[in-house]
Structure formats: structure tokens, C-alpha cells
Image: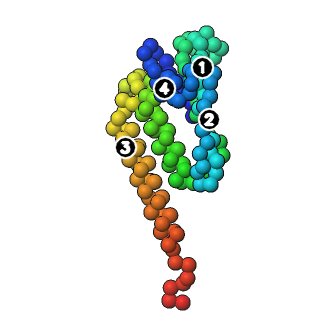
Amino acid sequence: YTYTCSGEGNDNCSPQTTGVGKQNGVSKTETKTIDGKQVTTVISSKVVDSTAPGNIRRVSYTEITNQLSNVPDSAQFLLAQASTLINTINTACPFFSVTNKPGGPQMKPTGGKLCDFTEEISAIQKMITDAQELVNQTSTINANEQTTQVGG
């Protein structure tokens, strides 16, 4: 996933927040063992100049990309990634801007910081925690399931 940071005083993409040494052209790689697999996360940072091709807003910004490889296909891992993502959004607190179009979906507010949605973020974090607990309980039930027929 990728997010961008712009605006004077916005330090959401700072090296202190992302863990990447510099804001432009630098990557940080971490490897963890999850479900017996080596999962690699690469966090990279680059500055996009206001005059860069494709930059239609003509505003300089920092782009942070988190790339995962060799991800296990398990509910627990996917929930862990969802938790990491929502915590990253809450910590980095990126700005957003939405243009409402007539006849289309309308969003209020049309701009601000994602971390301003504290109630929504808290609800998402609780849903993830509840789902993780459910997966743990299901795994325990499945591990203790009887394999012999009852009354046979």
C-alpha cells in the first residue's frame, strides 16, 4: 500500500515516523518469520516534485510505500496485517482531500487528517481484535476436535 504526505508542517512521512533513514530515495527492509515463512516488508520513501510528470496537483509531496512479499495465506496473518495498516494510518495520520461531485457520493468533511476519525479507527481496531480472538478460539476448537465417531 502507498500513502502520501504534503503540506507545510506535515511530518507524517518523516524519518522518525516511518523508520526510513531519509525522506527521498531510501528503503528499509525488515524480515519476520510468520507461520513458518520469512515475510519481508520493504518501506520506501521518495519525494515527488511539484513539476514531476503526472503530478496534476502541482504540489510536492512525499510518497511512502509498504510492500510485503511471501505473505502466508492465513486468517491470523491477514488480521495482523490489517492491524498494522490501521495502526500505521493512525500513527502517520496522513491528510486526505475529497472532491464531492453532483449526483455522486458526498463526504463530509472533504479534507483533514485520517487520524481525526478516532471513533471509526477505534471501532476498526476492536473488530480486528475480536476477529483475532475468534480465529484463536476456532483454532483451539479445531485442534481439540474428536476424530473418532461417537456411539460407533
Residue 42 percent across, percent down from the top left? 62, 35
Q: Earlier in the sequence, mark 4 or mark 3?
A: 4
Q: Which residue is mark 3?
A: 123
Please state which of the two labelled residues, at mark 4 or mark 3, is closer to the viewer: 4
Q: Residues within 10 Å of mark 1 (few under 14, many from 20)?
A: some
Residue 106 in sight: no
Q: Which residue shows up at 52% across the image and 24% down it? A: 15
Q: Residues within 10 Å of mark 4 (few under 14, many from 20)?
A: few
Name the kind of residue labelled 4 in the image: Gln
Name the kind of residue labelled 1 in the image: Asn
Please state which of the two labelled residues, at mark 1 or mark 3, is closer to the viewer: 1
Residue 81 percent across, percent down from the top left? 52, 44
| Mark 2 element type | strand
Q: CA distance from mark 4 to mark 1?
A: 14 Å
Q: Which residue shows up at 47% across the image and 60% down it? A: 136
Give the label on residue 16, or none. Answer: 4
